Amino acid sequence: MRLLISLLMAEMVAGGQTFRVAGGGAGWGNVLRAMGLVEGGVAELVVGEVVAGKVSVVVGLGAVAESVGVKKGEGEVEVRQVRDVASRELPVVWEKAVKLPVVVLEGEWEVRTRERWTGAPLVAVKKSGEGAVVWVATEIGEQGYERYPFLPQTLMAAGVRGRVRGGGLWAFFDGGYRQRVDMQYLVGQWKRAGIGVIHVTSWQFDGAEGERARWLERLIAMCHEQLIQVYAWVELPHVSEGFWQKYPECREKTGTGMDASLDWRRLMTLVEPRCAGLAEENVLGLLKRFDWDGVNLGELYFESLEGAENAARMTPFHESVREEYRKLYGRDPVEEIREKRWADYRADLAARLQADWLAKLETVRRERPNFDIVVTHIDDRFDTRMREALGADAARVLRGTEGQGTAFVIEDPATVWHLGPRRYREIRRRYEGLTGEPERLAIDLNIVERYQDVYPTRRQTGAELAQLIHEAAASFEQVALYFEYSLRPVDLPLVGWAAARVEAWEERGGRVRLKLGGPGKLEWRGPARVNGMVWPVGDEEGIWLPAGEWEVERGEAAPAVRVREHNVRLKGVREVEGGYEIAYETRAGGLLVVERAGGEREWVKVGRGKGRVVISAKRPAPGPVESSSARLLRQQ
């Protein structure tokens, strides 16, 4: 095999925010952008030369590699499986085997990736003064993750890091995986990763009493203390395991007449009036019992992805549905399982049920004005087979929820999980014009084991995961992750960088000029002036900026009042007499933690939607307010 020899030189300034690729293939740009870095600026990437004090990436063998202590040894090694120190237990498999020369590393190298069976080094890092050299045995591929999924972790070990983090991510949470976890540690991990909303498997707490109920109450309270909002995730027509056992007459049926216990879901009919009423009582009771910030009505349509090809998994065929169909068309739907009329009926029925249940959820919002309502719906625009298979019709749901403020989370079906990160651009394009409120559109990323033949890992991790988040955040205002348990701890530092939308960056003379496509937290120490204003939104680790173009420089003194933390989407800041006016947007009621000179703090509540709030340097009356969740934690 003829080895390509190239040098990738990344010049990092004050934390390494900028890069330029002069060799090594398109994949490097994908990896670095997904880490929140920006191409261009003062950075230089030099082929064939190593610059002292910089971070350099050398690819392959040759004169440049020899100059940093990487020399060709004796023999060859065939590489198909590799192991990386970032996740030693994880199988990493290349699509095709590659024969490579054995190398000798001279000097103090940290080997990050090795061939599985021989231990031959494939990726290594060597610190050199204030800089570092990263050596990679081969090109990394067009996408950037085909061979070395943990390149971001390697670059971090070399000192590369983003300076801006995105926030406000959503994540789905399955309590069944986390019963013995240190809850305080877990919530802290979510906070550091930039997760702002957790969608909890509410059905697992149907009828919860005693310690089980207190567990959920503690989770919600701890999340609220960290300004993480908690939504009830509802998966109708699955109600709960207890509901399935208690009401066998309400069990949905498949096309073969069997009870519709499919995968983990126990599906119930929502057409038969008595069963529908029992389900309503159950779900609304659960929503009103706990201190939820909102509800996610997820996947309310039918089974399965195989459609009419597998009657044993196809629904709905409960007698109430069959009776309704016979009255309409004079035929039993079991006899028309492959007919267009049956497919249209299922889509109509799914739309009716969705509208009905959204109306039921609105009754909760009337009691709690800041209660948010979200719909998660499988995509049928990119993979157009979903309407026939599931009865899913995204355009219809979007039209039916126009003007209601309902977020629409698009779930890409399992059939397209192997297509790579750039599919999110195309998915977003196909929803253009379906709603006059495009800000309602969100995307759900399934971070799971995939059934297709995918390389190099079954579940997305490292560079692939970072690119998924980065591409999704560039196309949608809101990104949801399914699910938080499937995020590897080694990937958590990447999540915030990947979610940041840094479109331009220049740093010179202690000033940073940057352009953000969405809100982000700039790593910054000490007081700051932003576009000439003493900036009042941030803490000791950094400052929050809205979308826009900003010039940040060192400030002379801290503001007399600041928003230390918040869980709203920051839209703007302006100075007013005695303080600042903060423009915000939030789907559920939000909180701002206001801090004044001397460390005095006040929790300021804001309502759902868009608004403005003034924070004043003057001490409020009657004084700081203890949050309800803080009181609950103190009492328990």
Image (cartoon, grey):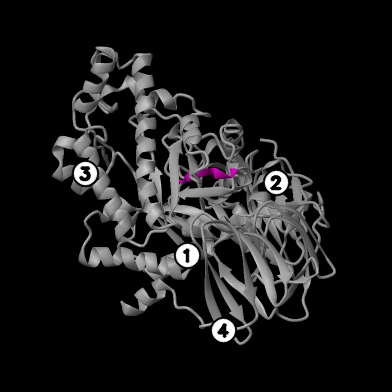
Image x and y of residue 16, in percent: 72, 61
Q: Name the residue under label 1.
A: 189
Mark 1 Cα within 10 Å, few/some/many (few <14, many 20+)? some
Residues rendered magenta in the picture: 439-447
Which label is found at residue 613?
none
At 14% from the left and 38% from the top, the residue drawn is 248
- Sequence-first disc among 1 and 4: 1
Image x and y of residue 116, in percent: 49, 49
Mark 2 Cα within 10 Å, few/some/many (few <14, many 20+)? many
Q: Nearer the viewer, mark 4 or mark 2?
A: 4
Which label is found at residue 278?
3
- Work out which quarter of the rendered image holds the C terminus and state it: bottom left
Mark 2–mark 1 Cα distance, whole angstroms, equals: 28 Å
Which label is found at residue 600?
4
Q: Name the residue under label 2.
A: 29
SS type, badge 2: helix
The amino acid pointed to by label 4 is Glu
**Front one among 195 and 155:** 195
Image x and y of residue 92, in percent: 49, 46
On screen, 132 above or below 350? below
Q: Is residue 312 at all visible to an observer of this figure?
A: yes
Mark 2–mark 3 Cα distance, whole angstroms, equals: 54 Å
Mark 4 Cα within 10 Å, few/some/many (few <14, many 20+)? few
